[in-house]
Image (spheres, helix red, strand yellow):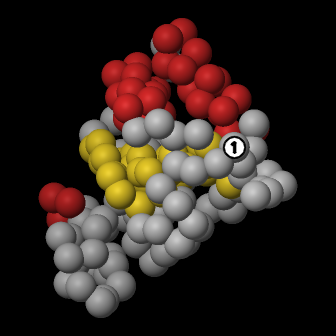
Amino acid sequence: MTLKADRIRKALTKRTKKGFRGYPIGTIAYYGPNNKIATKVVASIVAAEDAEADPMEKWFSDTDLRRDDLIFEKIRQFLTENDARSVVMLDRIIGCPHEEGIDYPEGEECNPQRAGVGGQATELCRGALWGARILGIHGRSG
């Protein structure tokens, strides 16, 4: 990871540690073919309690996006443009990068025998959650 990406990542992590500071909440989640490489990152905004995440931005790559300066800059810009007052980020990759309705039919589970971008099934297609902890929104009040 470059110094710039590390600095932005640390700043985002610091924002998560501030806890709930009100809405809108920015969320950051990583997805990948296994628990070692994040080939997809999703950032979204939750405007109010019980609201759907909207807007939402997604970035994809063949390389680990957690080490990409440009992606961290885009995430920071997205959160700033959408006035995120609180930030929630998982501390690791939480699932496969495949999307319902795009990579497999709506209402079905991702199936490693047929799933995958470019036909690649992944270790995480069965919905394994690699023990992720949520960073942020500690002791929510209000």
Q: Residue furthest top?
A: 3
Image: 129 above or below 47: below
The quadrant where residue 101 appears: bottom left
Position of the C terminus, as image quadrant, is bottom right
Q: Position of residue 140 (x, y in %)?
A: 77, 56
Q: Residue at x 66, y 33 (%)?
A: 15
Image: 77 above or below 96: above
Label 1: state its secondary structure. Answer: loop
Q: Residue at x 59, y 40 (%)?
A: 85
Q: Position of residue 106 (x, y in %)?
A: 24, 85
Image: 72 above or below 140: above
Front residue of 29/131: it is: 29
Q: Position of residue 107 (x, y in %)?
A: 30, 90
Q: Amino acid at mark 1?
A: Arg
Front residue of 71/52: it is: 52
Residue indicated by mark 1: 21
Whether residue 123 is visible here, answered yes or no, is no
Q: Residue at x 75, y 44 (%)?
A: 19
Q: Residue furthest front?
A: 142
The quadrant where residue 13 appears: top right
Whether residue 119 is visible here, answered yes or no, is yes
